[in-house]
Image: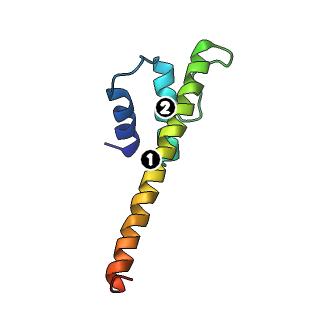
Amino acid sequence: MSTAQELFDSAFSVTRDPRSDAYRHGVLDILKYKLREINQTFGKSNYVMGTAEADAYYAGCDEGHRIAREYMAEQERQFAEAERISMNGTFGGR
């Protein structure tokens, strides 16, 4: 399973307000894009601008951006921590 799909499943497996298919589609599209797992249909909007479905899709994109930012920040934090531990071990605890 892709990281984008895992993050999506995690976001929607908790108790929360229900979201439309268009909203969920926006979340997953952005997660795939931000994590470089671009799908074939990304960028090919299935929603007509000015409709409630398009609004929902783009609201989902906003959540997808937020989830991706949080994930990438955590990955960066873990990398920095691992690097710090590695450097301390390599240089005798300095």
Query: From the viewer's perspective, is residue 83 above or below residue 78?
Result: below
Circle 1 — which element?
A: helix
In which quadrant of the rendered image does the N terminus lie? top left
**Which residue is at the far right?**
50
Residue 46 shown left or right of residue 10 in the figure: right
Q: What residue type is labelled 1?
A: Tyr
Q: In terms of sequence position, does the residue under pointer 2 or pointer 1 come before the other?
A: 2
SS category of the residue bearing label 2: helix
Q: Residue 71 carries which label?
A: 1
Q: Which residue lies furthest to the top in this view?
A: 52
Q: Horizontally, is 51 left or right of 65 in the view?
A: right
Q: Position of residue 83 (x, y in %)?
A: 40, 71
Foreground pick, 18 / 88: 88
Residue 3 pos. (x, y %):
37, 45
Residue at image coords 64%, 18%: 48
Q: Quadrant of residue 14?
A: top left
Residue 8 percent location from the top left of the image: 39, 34
> Which residue was labeled with disc 2?
27
Distance of label 2 from label 1 (alpha carbons): 14 Å
Image position of 52 with respect to 34: above or below = above
